Amino acid sequence: MFRNQYDTDVTTWSPTGRLFQVEYAMEAVKQGSAAIGLRSSSHVVLACVNKAQSELSSHQKKIFKVDDHIGVAIAGLTADGRVLSRYMRSESINHSFTYESPLPVGRLVVHLADKAQVCTQRSWKRPYGVGLLVGGLDESGAHLYYNCPSGNYFEYQAFAIGSRSQAAKTYLERRFESFADSSREDLIKDAILAVRETLQGETLKSSLCTVSVLGVGEPFHFLDQEAIQKMIDTFEKVPEEEEGDAEVAAPAEQGGGADGLGDQDVAPMEM
Protein backbone atom coordinates (compact mmCIF):
# COMPACT_ATOMS: atom_id res chain seq x y z
CA MET A 1 0.00 0.00 0.00
CA PHE A 2 3.01 2.30 -0.33
CA ARG A 3 2.05 5.52 -2.17
CA ASN A 4 5.52 6.93 -2.96
CA GLN A 5 6.17 10.50 -1.82
CA TYR A 6 2.57 11.32 -0.92
CA ASP A 7 2.19 9.12 2.15
CA THR A 8 5.23 10.16 4.19
CA ASP A 9 3.36 12.87 6.09
CA VAL A 10 -0.20 13.21 7.29
CA THR A 11 -0.35 16.81 6.03
CA THR A 12 0.80 16.02 2.48
CA TRP A 13 -1.96 15.99 -0.11
CA SER A 14 -1.79 13.70 -3.12
CA PRO A 15 -2.58 15.09 -6.59
CA THR A 16 -5.97 13.36 -6.34
CA GLY A 17 -6.83 15.18 -3.10
CA ARG A 18 -6.27 12.32 -0.67
CA LEU A 19 -4.48 12.00 2.66
CA PHE A 20 -3.03 8.51 2.58
CA GLN A 21 -1.93 8.46 6.22
CA VAL A 22 -5.56 8.97 7.24
CA GLU A 23 -6.63 6.18 4.89
CA TYR A 24 -4.02 3.89 6.43
CA ALA A 25 -5.49 4.61 9.87
CA MET A 26 -8.92 3.68 8.52
CA GLU A 27 -7.38 0.47 7.18
CA ALA A 28 -6.15 -0.35 10.70
CA VAL A 29 -9.79 -0.34 11.84
CA LYS A 30 -10.60 -2.99 9.22
CA GLN A 31 -7.81 -5.21 10.56
CA GLY A 32 -9.11 -5.21 14.15
CA SER A 33 -11.50 -7.75 15.61
CA ALA A 34 -15.15 -7.09 14.83
CA ALA A 35 -17.33 -4.81 16.96
CA ILE A 36 -21.10 -4.48 16.56
CA GLY A 37 -23.67 -2.01 17.84
CA LEU A 38 -27.48 -1.97 17.71
CA ARG A 39 -30.08 0.33 19.17
CA SER A 40 -33.81 0.30 19.70
CA SER A 41 -36.00 3.10 21.00
CA SER A 42 -35.02 2.29 24.59
CA HIS A 43 -31.84 0.16 24.59
CA VAL A 44 -28.37 0.01 23.07
CA VAL A 45 -26.38 -3.22 22.74
CA LEU A 46 -22.64 -3.39 22.01
CA ALA A 47 -20.90 -6.67 21.17
CA CYS A 48 -17.42 -7.65 20.05
CA VAL A 49 -15.37 -10.70 19.13
CA ASN A 50 -12.81 -11.82 21.71
CA LYS A 51 -9.65 -12.33 19.67
CA ALA A 52 -6.49 -13.56 21.41
CA GLN A 53 -3.03 -13.18 19.88
CA SER A 54 -2.21 -16.79 20.75
CA GLU A 55 -3.61 -19.74 22.66
CA LEU A 56 -1.40 -18.83 25.62
CA SER A 57 -2.69 -15.28 26.00
CA SER A 58 -5.98 -13.74 27.01
CA HIS A 59 -7.98 -11.48 24.73
CA GLN A 60 -7.80 -7.70 25.02
CA LYS A 61 -10.76 -5.71 26.27
CA LYS A 62 -12.69 -4.11 23.40
CA ILE A 63 -15.72 -2.62 25.16
CA PHE A 64 -15.36 0.14 27.76
CA LYS A 65 -17.73 1.84 30.14
CA VAL A 66 -17.69 5.64 29.86
CA ASP A 67 -20.58 6.42 32.20
CA ASP A 68 -23.77 4.76 33.39
CA HIS A 69 -25.48 5.98 30.21
CA ILE A 70 -22.61 5.64 27.68
CA GLY A 71 -20.44 2.75 26.49
CA VAL A 72 -17.97 2.35 23.64
CA ALA A 73 -16.80 -0.60 21.51
CA ILE A 74 -13.57 -0.34 19.52
CA ALA A 75 -11.89 -1.96 16.52
CA GLY A 76 -8.29 -1.28 15.57
CA LEU A 77 -5.37 -0.37 17.81
CA THR A 78 -6.50 -1.22 21.32
CA ALA A 79 -4.00 1.15 22.91
CA ASP A 80 -5.47 4.11 21.00
CA GLY A 81 -8.97 3.01 21.94
CA ARG A 82 -8.02 2.80 25.60
CA VAL A 83 -6.64 6.35 25.55
CA LEU A 84 -9.72 7.75 23.81
CA SER A 85 -12.10 5.94 26.16
CA ARG A 86 -10.24 7.49 29.09
CA TYR A 87 -10.64 10.91 27.45
CA MET A 88 -14.37 10.29 27.03
CA ARG A 89 -14.66 9.23 30.65
CA SER A 90 -12.92 12.42 31.76
CA GLU A 91 -15.22 14.59 29.63
CA SER A 92 -18.29 12.88 31.07
CA ILE A 93 -17.13 13.30 34.66
CA ASN A 94 -16.25 16.98 34.14
CA HIS A 95 -19.65 17.69 32.61
CA SER A 96 -21.48 15.92 35.43
CA PHE A 97 -19.47 17.84 38.04
CA THR A 98 -20.00 21.22 36.36
CA TYR A 99 -23.64 20.97 35.28
CA GLU A 100 -24.91 18.24 37.63
CA SER A 101 -26.48 16.41 34.69
CA PRO A 102 -25.42 13.56 32.40
CA LEU A 103 -23.42 14.50 29.31
CA PRO A 104 -25.52 14.26 26.11
CA VAL A 105 -24.21 11.53 23.84
CA GLY A 106 -24.10 13.70 20.73
CA ARG A 107 -21.98 16.35 22.43
CA LEU A 108 -19.44 13.79 23.58
CA VAL A 109 -19.22 12.36 20.06
CA VAL A 110 -18.52 15.83 18.63
CA HIS A 111 -15.72 16.38 21.17
CA LEU A 112 -14.25 13.01 20.23
CA ALA A 113 -14.46 13.77 16.51
CA ASP A 114 -12.74 17.15 17.03
CA LYS A 115 -9.92 15.44 18.90
CA ALA A 116 -9.46 12.94 16.08
CA GLN A 117 -9.58 15.65 13.41
CA VAL A 118 -6.70 17.61 14.95
CA CYS A 119 -4.44 14.61 14.33
CA THR A 120 -5.13 14.83 10.59
CA GLN A 121 -3.60 18.32 10.19
CA ARG A 122 -0.59 18.29 12.51
CA SER A 123 2.67 17.02 11.05
CA TRP A 124 4.00 15.94 14.45
CA LYS A 125 0.96 13.76 15.18
CA ARG A 126 -0.54 10.66 13.62
CA PRO A 127 -4.23 9.76 13.23
CA TYR A 128 -5.74 7.47 15.83
CA GLY A 129 -5.81 3.97 14.36
CA VAL A 130 -9.09 2.98 15.95
CA GLY A 131 -12.78 3.16 15.15
CA LEU A 132 -15.30 3.62 17.95
CA LEU A 133 -18.94 2.64 18.24
CA VAL A 134 -20.40 4.95 20.87
CA GLY A 135 -23.73 3.87 22.31
CA GLY A 136 -25.67 5.89 24.83
CA LEU A 137 -28.98 7.06 26.20
CA ASP A 138 -29.98 10.64 26.99
CA GLU A 139 -33.08 12.82 27.10
CA SER A 140 -33.59 12.51 23.33
CA GLY A 141 -33.49 8.70 23.38
CA ALA A 142 -31.04 5.94 22.49
CA HIS A 143 -28.13 6.70 20.16
CA LEU A 144 -25.43 4.80 18.31
CA TYR A 145 -22.56 6.66 16.64
CA TYR A 146 -19.51 5.59 14.68
CA ASN A 147 -16.39 7.74 15.07
CA CYS A 148 -13.88 7.41 12.24
CA PRO A 149 -10.10 8.11 12.46
CA SER A 150 -10.64 10.86 9.86
CA GLY A 151 -12.68 12.89 12.37
CA ASN A 152 -16.04 12.11 10.76
CA TYR A 153 -18.91 10.68 12.77
CA PHE A 154 -22.20 9.10 11.76
CA GLU A 155 -25.31 8.00 13.62
CA TYR A 156 -26.66 4.52 12.89
CA GLN A 157 -29.52 2.25 13.78
CA ALA A 158 -27.04 -0.63 13.68
CA PHE A 159 -23.45 -0.92 12.49
CA ALA A 160 -20.43 -3.22 12.45
CA ILE A 161 -16.72 -2.43 12.13
CA GLY A 162 -13.53 -4.46 12.09
CA SER A 163 -12.36 -7.64 10.43
CA ARG A 164 -15.00 -9.58 8.47
CA SER A 165 -17.64 -7.04 9.48
CA GLN A 166 -19.27 -7.07 6.03
CA ALA A 167 -21.06 -10.34 6.84
CA ALA A 168 -22.47 -8.76 10.00
CA LYS A 169 -23.51 -5.63 8.06
CA THR A 170 -25.40 -7.81 5.59
CA TYR A 171 -27.28 -9.47 8.45
CA LEU A 172 -28.04 -6.11 10.09
CA GLU A 173 -29.25 -4.61 6.81
CA ARG A 174 -31.81 -7.41 6.51
CA ARG A 175 -33.08 -6.87 10.05
CA PHE A 176 -32.60 -3.20 10.94
CA GLU A 177 -36.17 -2.09 10.19
CA SER A 178 -37.44 -4.09 13.16
CA PHE A 179 -34.78 -2.86 15.62
CA ALA A 180 -36.64 0.31 16.65
CA ASP A 181 -39.46 -1.73 18.21
CA SER A 182 -37.31 -4.65 19.38
CA SER A 183 -37.31 -5.78 22.99
CA ARG A 184 -34.13 -5.95 25.03
CA GLU A 185 -33.82 -9.71 24.59
CA ASP A 186 -34.41 -9.59 20.83
CA LEU A 187 -31.80 -6.86 20.44
CA ILE A 188 -29.22 -8.92 22.34
CA LYS A 189 -30.09 -11.98 20.24
CA ASP A 190 -29.58 -10.03 17.00
CA ALA A 191 -26.24 -8.75 18.28
CA ILE A 192 -25.04 -12.29 19.03
CA LEU A 193 -26.24 -13.54 15.65
CA ALA A 194 -24.37 -10.70 13.94
CA VAL A 195 -21.23 -11.70 15.85
CA ARG A 196 -21.71 -15.27 14.62
CA GLU A 197 -21.73 -14.01 11.02
CA THR A 198 -18.20 -12.63 11.45
CA LEU A 199 -16.80 -15.98 12.65
CA GLN A 200 -17.23 -17.59 9.20
CA GLY A 201 -17.87 -21.20 10.18
CA GLU A 202 -16.30 -21.16 13.62
CA THR A 203 -18.62 -22.40 16.36
CA LEU A 204 -20.04 -19.56 18.42
CA LYS A 205 -19.37 -19.84 22.15
CA SER A 206 -19.77 -17.36 24.98
CA SER A 207 -16.00 -17.23 25.38
CA LEU A 208 -15.66 -15.80 21.86
CA CYS A 209 -17.80 -12.71 22.40
CA THR A 210 -18.47 -9.93 24.88
CA VAL A 211 -21.90 -8.29 25.09
CA SER A 212 -22.91 -5.14 26.96
CA VAL A 213 -26.27 -3.42 27.25
CA LEU A 214 -27.73 -0.16 28.54
CA GLY A 215 -31.23 1.23 28.44
CA VAL A 216 -34.04 3.02 30.20
CA GLY A 217 -33.69 2.22 33.90
CA GLU A 218 -30.72 -0.03 33.15
CA PRO A 219 -27.18 1.37 33.58
CA PHE A 220 -24.39 0.19 31.31
CA HIS A 221 -23.20 -3.30 32.24
CA PHE A 222 -21.74 -6.46 30.76
CA LEU A 223 -23.70 -9.68 30.39
CA ASP A 224 -22.09 -12.63 32.15
CA GLN A 225 -20.87 -15.60 30.16
CA GLU A 226 -23.59 -17.93 31.46
CA ALA A 227 -26.39 -15.65 30.25
CA ILE A 228 -24.75 -15.33 26.83
CA GLN A 229 -24.29 -19.11 26.53
CA LYS A 230 -27.92 -19.77 27.46
CA MET A 231 -29.06 -17.37 24.74
CA ILE A 232 -26.72 -19.01 22.22
CA ASP A 233 -28.11 -22.44 23.12
CA THR A 234 -31.70 -21.31 22.53
CA PHE A 235 -31.22 -20.41 18.87
CA GLU A 236 -28.53 -23.01 18.12
CA LYS A 237 -30.91 -25.87 18.96
CA VAL A 238 -33.75 -24.67 16.71
CA PRO A 239 -32.02 -25.46 13.36
CA GLU A 240 -30.99 -28.89 14.70
CA GLU A 241 -34.60 -29.75 15.58
CA GLU A 242 -35.81 -28.64 12.13
CA GLU A 243 -33.19 -30.83 10.44
CA GLY A 244 -34.25 -33.80 12.58
CA ASP A 245 -37.90 -33.37 11.58
CA ALA A 246 -36.94 -33.24 7.90
CA GLU A 247 -34.95 -36.47 8.17
CA VAL A 248 -37.87 -38.30 9.81
CA ALA A 249 -40.33 -37.12 7.14
CA ALA A 250 -38.15 -38.11 4.18
CA PRO A 251 -38.13 -41.93 4.80
CA ALA A 252 -41.89 -41.91 5.34
CA GLU A 253 -42.45 -40.37 1.90
CA GLN A 254 -40.05 -42.78 0.23
CA GLY A 255 -41.50 -45.85 1.96
CA GLY A 256 -44.97 -45.00 0.69
CA GLY A 257 -44.01 -45.61 -2.97
CA ALA A 258 -45.63 -48.49 -4.89
CA ASP A 259 -43.80 -51.81 -5.66
CA GLY A 260 -41.01 -50.93 -3.22
CA LEU A 261 -39.55 -48.23 -5.48
CA GLY A 262 -38.84 -46.11 -2.40
CA ASP A 263 -36.25 -48.67 -1.20
CA GLN A 264 -34.15 -48.03 -4.30
CA ASP A 265 -33.64 -44.32 -3.50
CA VAL A 266 -30.58 -43.02 -1.65
CA ALA A 267 -31.02 -43.00 2.12
CA PRO A 268 -31.39 -39.49 3.63
CA MET A 269 -28.30 -39.92 5.79
CA GLU A 270 -26.15 -40.48 2.67
CA MET A 271 -27.32 -37.45 0.69
Image (tube, grey):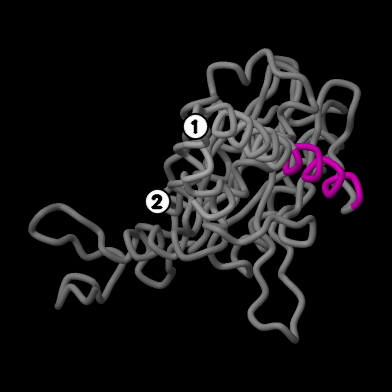
Q: Secondary structure at mark 1?
A: helix
* The one of 102 and 144 positioned closer to us in this rendering: 144
Indicate which disc residue 40 carries.
none
Overall secondary structure of the magenta stretch? helix
Q: Secondary structure at mark 2?
A: loop
Q: Residue furthest bottom?
A: 56
The image shows residue 94 at horizontal and vertical percentages of: 79, 42
Residue shown at 66%/59% (left/top)?
203
Residue at the disc numbered 2: 150
**Is there CB contact under 8 Å for labels 2 and 1?**
no
Left or right: where 123 falls relative to 211: left
* The one of 68 and 241 positioned closer to us in this rendering: 241
The image shows residue 53 at horizontal and vertical percentages of: 63, 79
The image shows residue 249 at horizontal and vertical percentages of: 64, 31
Residue shown at 66%/63% (left/top)?
83
Residue shown at 76%/41% (left/top)?
237
Does 170 appear above or below 148? above
Q: Which residues are magenta?
A: 226-237
Residue shown at 84%/49% (left/top)?
229
Residue at the disc numbered 1: 259
Q: Earlier in the sequence, mark 2 or mark 1?
A: 2
Q: Quadrant of the N terminus?
A: bottom left
Which mark lies nearer to you, 2 or 1? 1
Hey, what amino acid is under mark 1?
Asp
